[in-house]
Amino acid sequence: MDGVTETKRFDLRSDTLRDVNKFLHGDLSGINTVRVENPDGAHSIAVGLNAPVHVDILGHAGYYAAGMNQLANVVVHGNAGPGVAENMMSGIVEVRGFASGGAGASAHGGRLIIRGDAGLRCGISLKGADIIVAGDVGSFSAFMAQAGRMLICGDAGDGLGDSLYEAVLYVRGEIRSLGSDARVEPMTAADHAAVKEMLEVAGLRHSSSEFKRVASARSLYHWNADANQEY
Amino acid sequence: MCGIVGLLIKKPALRAQLGELMVPMLIGMTERGPDSSGMAVFTQPVPDEKRKISLYCGSPQFDWQAFKSALTEKFKGVSLELRVNHAVMTTQSSPDEVRAWVARHHPDVHVLSVGRSIDLYKDVGLPAEVAQRYEFSKAVGSHLVGHTRMATESAVTPENAHPYTAGEDWCLVHNGSLANPGMLRRKLEKLGARFESDCDTEGACRYLHWRLEQGESLETALDHAFEDFDGFFTFLMGTADKLALVRDPFACKPAVVAETEDYVAIASEFRSLAHLPGVRNATVFEPKPAEVYSWTV
C-alpha cells in the first residue's frame, strides 16, 4: 500500500452503517485500516468490500458481517451473527469470538477463521473457501459443500458433510454423526500438508496427526433406482 | 421476523429498573419488521388469596368505569388499574368465575393473563409505540418476557400478538412457525382448553402448560414438544420465578444470552443487549439447539 498507514475511524453510536459501508465502497487510496467502534450487533457491517483494506470491527457484529468479501481483511473483535462472510470471494475474515449459524455459507474463496465455536450450518454449500474453526461446529455443517476445505479443531454436530461434493473436511474432535454420503477417509501426505498449512496460517498449534479426513463417498453422484429413495 | 427479549434481575436493587432496561431491548428488535409488540412482567406476587387478571378491550368506546363498577359489585376485593385499553384487575374471587362472567357479559373483553405475579400488555404497533402506550419503562419486578411480532400465519390483531398465557403465572413467546397448530388445538380442546386466538403460538403455549399441569418437568414437556410440534421455534417462557429458553433441534431461529452477576438477558440478537450495563464483561453465548436453559429468580 505504498507505505501509507492512514486509519479511518467510525463509531456506530454516532455514524450510520451506511456511512461506513459507503466509505468502504468508495475510493480507499491512502487508507489501509478502517476501525468500526461500537458495532453493537448491527447487521451487514463491511459487506461487499472489493479492496485490500483492513477493517477492525471492535465488538459484536450482527447478521452478514463481511458478506461477499473480496480482497479485504476483516476482523470481528467479538462474536458474529448469522451468515458471517457468506459468499466471500477472496480476502480474510476473522471472528475472534463465536460465529452464529451459516458462517461462510457458499463462500467461493478466501479464508474464514473463527476463534471460538461456529453455530449450525457452518460452510453450507461451500464453493472454494477455506474455513478454519478453532472450536466446535454445529449440526449440518458443510451440507452440500462443493469445493474448498474446512478445518474443525473441536467437535462436529450431527449430519456433518451431508451430500458433500468435492469439499474436504478435517476434524480433530468427535463427530456426533456424519451426513449422507460423507465418510471418514485415511489421511494422505497431501492431507497432512493441507492441515499443517491451515494450522499455521491461523496460528494454531495442533498436530496434523490429530485430524481425520471427511470427504464424499460419491455414491449420490449418480441416480440409483434401487435405493428406493433411501440414502 | 419475530423478536424475543427476556430479562431476569438477580440483584434485587435493580428490580425497580426492570422496565427501563427492557424498553431499549424491545426497541432493538424493530428492524426485524414487527407489526405488534407485547410484554409480560412478573411483579411482587399478591397474597395467596388474591389473583391478578390482565384484561384487554379493543373497542375505544368501551366504558371502563361502568365495567369497574360492575366488577366491584359482582366480585370480592376488586381493584382495577387501567392503562389505555388494558386493565389489571386484582380480586379475591375465583379467576374462573371472573373469566366466565366477563365472557358472558363482555365478550369483547379478553382475559390476557391470570396469576399472582403476571401482568400482560400486548397490542398492534411498533415496539417504541406500544412500550410508550403502556408505559413499559415503568415496569417493576423480578423478570419479564417481551416480544415483537412479524405475523406469518394469522392476522395482525392484538389477540394474536404475544405473549400467550395459559393457567396461572405462565407465559410463552415464540419466534418461528408451527405447521400443525390445528392438530395441537384439536387435541387440547378435547381436554378442555379454551383458545382465545387463531395464532399457532397459542397451541404451543397451551400444550406445554397442559404437560406441566400433568406434573411433567419443563424438560420432559419440551421433549414431548420436539416430537409433537412440526415447525421452527425459539420459545421464551416465564413462570412466577423462572425464565426458560429453548430452540428447536435445527436452531432455525436465533437467540443470544448475556449473563452477569446482576442479570440474565435474552434476545433474538445482540443488538438488543448492547445497551445493558456491564454487558461488555457479560458471559455472552448462543443457546444450543434442543437444549433447555432456565434461570430462577
Image: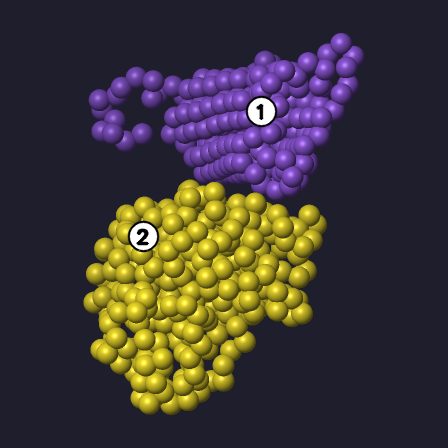
Seen in the picture, residue A114 relative to B47 is either above or below; the reply is above
Element type where label 2 sits in the image: loop
In the image, residue B220 lies at what x, y percent?
41, 61
Element type where label 1 sits in the image: helix
Residue B213: name its quadrant. Answer: bottom left
Rendered hue of chain A is: purple
Please name whichever residue, B61 or A210, is drawn nearer the observer in this view of the structure: B61
Q: Which chain is yellow?
A: B
Report the number of discs: 2
Residue beneath disc 1: A22
The answer to whether one can see residue B82 in this image is yes
Q: Chain of mark 2?
A: B
Q: Is residue A48 left or right of residue A208?
A: left
Which residue shows up at 66% across the image and 17% down it? A28
In the rendered structure, which amino acid carries the disc numbered 1?
Lys
Residue beneath disc 2: B156
Query: Mark 2 and mark 1: span between their CA atoms?
Result: 36 Å
